[in-house]
Structure formats: C-alpha cells, structure tokens
Image (cartoon, grey):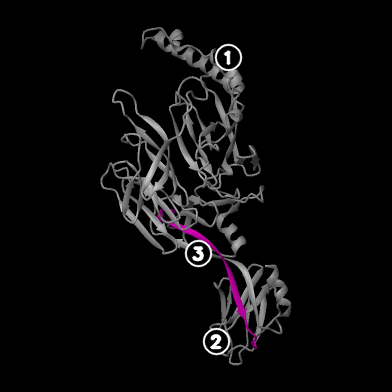
Amino acid sequence: MRPAKLLSLSLLTVFTLCLQAQSSKVEVLRVGIPWSPQGISPNGRFISGTRQYEEAYFYDTETKKLHTQACQSGTSQLVFFDVSDDGTVVGKTDDGHPATYKNGNWTLLPTPSAPFGDASAVYIINSDGSRILGQVAIKPDGGKPYEVVPSLWERVGENEWKHTALPVPPKDFLNEGAPQFVSPRQMSEDGKTIVGLIINQTGKYMMQILYERQEDGSWEYSLPFLSVFCDMSKYQELKALEPDFKKMVTAKPGSQEYFQQIESYNKAFAKWDYMMKTNWLTGNEVLTLPILMSENGKYIASAWMKNTYSYEEGSMEVQKKQEYHPTLYNIKDKTFTHFPALKGYAPLGVTNKGNMICTDNIHIYIIDVSQPDKVYKMPDWIKEKYNVDIMAFLPENTKYMKSPIINGEGNLIACKYITAHPDNSLDLQDIFCVRITNDVAVEKVEQNSLKVHPNPTKGIVKIEGATPSKELRVMSMQGELLLSSQTDLLGNGTIDLTPLASGAYLIGVKGEKSTVLIKE
C-alpha cells in the first residue's frame, strides 16, 4: 500500500493521525454440508445446492446459518438452483413445478401448461429477484411428444410473475428440421442477454445460442460459434455422399452375408465420416458445456478445442486427438481472447472482469485475465492478493478441492474440499466459502512512547517503550492476528516478520494503540 509506505518514514517520531484505506477482509467459512454448490448470489452472500432425491440447501455467509430442505420421496424433483441477493431461492418443488422459495414458503411460477416429466428447470435469478430464467417441459397434447419451452419470468407484483416463452428457431443449425429443444442457461443482470443450448433434430450436435433483447422488447437470437465449428456452405454437398445403410445392407439379419455387408458399410461410413470431419468441420470448437456467462453480460467463458482427426484406409473408425485452452468471448465486440499457454484448463466460472475459475478435481485454479500466461492455485492467488492463507482454516489432511463456483464480483468463491486418511482413503467432504469484503477503514494512531526499529524492515524488529510483560501483536491492516510475542520487564521485545509477505502491518501491545509497520 503506497500511502502506508510513505507514512512509515516518520514513524520513529510518531504523531497523532488517521489512516484511511480500502481494505479487504477474507473469511474462510466451512458450511457443514458435502453437496456441491450450484447457485451463488451476485452480492456474494448466499450459496445454494442440492443432493438429488435427498435434500436441498442454502447457506448465508453473513449469519453463518445453513438451511436444509429434505426431499419428500425417493422420486422427488426438489432442487435449489440459484439464489438472489435477499436470499430468494429458485428451483423446483418436490413434484417438479418451477418455483421460488423464501422464508420456508414456495411460490409457484406460472407455466404454459402443467409441467411434464422431469425436464423442467429454473437456472438463474438476478440480484433483486425481478427476473428468472429457465425452461418448462409440457405435454398439452397426450398424443404428441413433450416439448421444452425456454422461459423467462418477470415480476409484475408481489409474488406475481409474467411468463414469456423465448423464440425458438424453426429449424436447427443444420437446416434439417426443428431443433429438439432450446435450454436457456445464463442471463445477464439486466435481463437483456441470455445464453443457452440448442440441440439439433437428431441430437448429435449441440451449440450455444445467444439471445439479445431489442429496444422494442423483442428477442433476436444468433449462433455466435457456428462458423468456428464448421463451414455450412459445404454441408449439403458432403452430406449427400453419406453411405446409405438400407442400400448397402440387404441380406437376411444373422446371415454371413449380412455381417459382411455390415462390415462393408462401417468401413464406408468411417471413410465418409473422415471426409466430413476434415472438410465440413474446421477442427476448432468452443466447448458447449458448461454454459458460462459473466453476470454483467460481457463475457462467455469456455474452452477452445482443437480437434485433429486421423484415418487409415479400411478402418472402421476415425481417431481424434484433442487439445484445449481457456477462451473468453466478448459478446459486444464479437472477439475472442485466447489463453493458449494454459493448455488443459477449462473454466467453470467467470467474473465480470473476465477472471476464470477451474479445477482438475485435485486443485482449484484462478485464471487472472491480466496475466494470460499464468494460472494460480486458488490458495496461492488469495495469499498473493490478500495475504491470507486459506489452507490454515481447513483440515491439515485436505487433499482434494473441486466443484468451484464464483460470483460476478469475484468476492465469493464456494467449493468442496475432501480430506483423506494416510492410506489415501477418503475421510470428510464439506463445502467451504472464501468471502472477501471490502471496507474503507479508518485507523487512528495516536502519539505514544512505542519505538519500532528498523522500520521499514526485512525481518526482525526491536520494540522499546511498550507496556512490560504484555502480549506484543502483529496484525494485518484488517485486524487479523498474524504473529505474537511477549515484552520483557522493561517493555522491550523483538519479533521476526520473515514469514510475512511484503506490505503494511500493525504492531502493538494488546489493548493499546498500534503503530504501522512496513515489511519490505
């Protein structure tokens, strides 16, 4: 902190002053439940999650209270998907109806007709709880298959909601028929940008679909990554060359000739498939799942896949090799930012600044957009940025971290930690939260007789003029105790700051005024 370092030049003759600074307090909170988090409030206060067929939960990081809701049966569809800034949860009731949950009460959301099956979902609620995004599976006609309606709910009064069905393309991106369904997954805070998933008619391909709200309130949709994935100008011509199973396999099933025809067909199909993959497909792909968008609607985060195909004449299959690295897509500018140095990392969350979080199910990593060639283990990133060792708050035998989520401001990270016995058998699973709060703090340092030297220091400092036989404390600027020792009968003492990172600290006797100390 530059102001504190300038201040330290005059600390040997201490004056009465006020030091005002932006400070960050880091809390590590163990939730007390092992089920992976699914939702996180934009203000960084709440998380929510579900253990299918067992229970759902949400946790308040301010009150440190955990609320659980038990499933009523082994076929229950109860789920808590997401949570707003005031603790309103969105999800599904035991019987599968999309709803909000607050203070122990459910409010059912309106649907085009009664939900059918288990394909309905409510994925996102914005910060003030005025907009909810999800999908409703319905079957109004018993003679037809069920359909999935991409849905937006907007609050029009207290516990009153208007349902809007988002438009669905009449044909899929291969132009071969209606898509199987569209599943909207992410929504910007202002409700004007939505990202979802579109499945082609056969179910073989899926693609991200982007919805943008126009000035008149209507919605326009696009497929921003289709041209990354393939060259549609070649599709119909190449598709027409696909081997015809009915023409190639005509023998009686089970006969020797039948199996020979099947083998011939498989070889012909593999050869054609290789031609499709190396002519129609570009070899590049934006990983479809999970669908990730920053809360401000600026970025889509994903992994950039590079696929390489190989084929040997007469083979019955095409081989594929794959490499990937993180990528950020700027929705407004329609541009990609690639992180090619970070091969093998795929994001699981993205902040409003474009920072990403990911895991290999052993460690959790932070990708800082300002350092595109470097990836941090999450504890190291927090230690470097906030001078807090989060591992000190977890069991010593913590071995794995997984299932991370992060909110848009990046001030709440929730994930699972798993401990292991010496023989590597698993012991405990629990969710923990890293909560970062920023406050403007005013520290008043009054004139006293305490002398600290050298200041600045690189290691050991000597203290004179303190109260005799008292605990001498070194604290962070947020008041967290970091080191301690004891003054002697004359009020003198020493303390070694070598374990601490460079920065500004407070040093003083417990219960008395502190002095700012600089560690170089």
Mark 2 neighbour class, 10 Å CA radius: few under 14, some 14 to 19, many 20 or more: some
In this rendering, does residue 248 appear at all?
A: yes
The residue singled out by tag 1 in the image is 237
**What is the CA distance from the residue labelled 2 to the residue labelled 3?**
28 Å
Q: Tell me the amino acid under the disc marked 3.
A: Glu
Q: Is residue 456 visible?
A: no
Compared to residue 48, the image places residue 439 above or below, namely below
Residue 124 placement, left or right of 69: right
**Percent of width and height locating residue 250:** 41, 7
Q: Secondary structure at mark 2?
A: loop
Magenta span covers which residues?
424-449
Q: Quadrant of the N terminus?
A: bottom right
As drawn, the residue found furthest toward the left would be: 73
Residue 457 drawn at (x, y percent)? 70, 75
Label 3 CA crowd tier, 10 Å (few <14, some 14–19, many 20+): some
Q: Which residue is mark 2?
A: 470
Residue that badge 3 annotates = 27
Q: Amino acid at mark 1?
A: Glu
Residue drawn at x 29%, y 23% as measured from the top left: 143
Q: In the rendering, at what x and y percent does residue 279 appear?
A: 61, 21
Location of residue 41 with respect to 481 vertically, above or below: above
Residue 40 or residue 110, whichever sits in front: 110
Viewer-closest of 256 and 224 = 224
Secondary structure of the residue carrying tag 1 is helix
Q: Element type at marker 3?
A: strand
